Image (cartoon, rainbow, N blue to C red):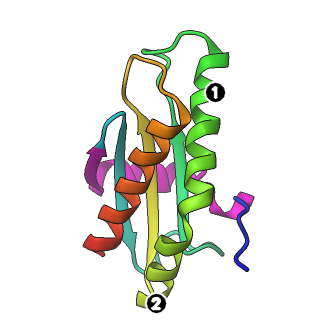
Amino acid sequence: MPCNGLPKEEILRTLGAIDALFTGGRRTSSMPIRCVWRTLGPEEFPSEANVEVLFSVPKKFFKRANKRNLLRRRMKESYRLSKHALVESVAAKGARLHIALIYSSKELSDYATINEAVNRILEQICGRL
């Protein structure tokens, strides 16, 4: 049975890696979420995890932190439950991947909408690897 956790090693935190992701990454979207992703070689930004992910909800759209945190938790939960196919395909190809999931709507979405969008994005990334 696969582990459904989201350990600290799978969270994208380093400033250099985030900067490289946004300057040289590919973009895709599935409303209400935009995604920037980048495949890496084994020598770039060494880490223990094959897939590292970043979650963001802009303060521009939601001024209150409780709403931003709610949406970020929903995105994390959706990713956590549906990441296995992506992690397996990345590991099978021997690649590494950085992903940024950015909430891009001004309306507060429910979990089902966010889950659909995250699943579509992960399927698109698996197809383009």
| Direction from residue 53 to residue 129 in the image, left or right | left
Q: Which residue is mark 1?
A: 70
Q: Which residue is mark 2?
A: 92
Residue at 49% of width from left, 74% of height from top? 85
Instruction: State which quadrant residue 20 falls in.
Output: bottom left
Residue at 45% of width from left, 79% of height from top? 90
| Direction from residue 118 to residue 7 in the image, left or right | right
- Let me know if residue 126 appears in the view: yes
Q: Residues within 10 Å of mark 1 (few under 14, many from 20)?
A: some
Provide the secondary structure element on which disc 1 rests: helix
Residue type at the position of mark 2:
Ala
Residue at 63% of width from left, 47% of height from top? 77
Residue type at the position of mark 1:
Leu
Q: Which residues are magenta?
A: 7-29
Q: Are marks 2 and 1 in contact (CB under 8 Å)?
A: no
Query: The C terminus appears in which quarter of the rendering?
Result: bottom left
**What numbered label is drawn on residue 89?**
none
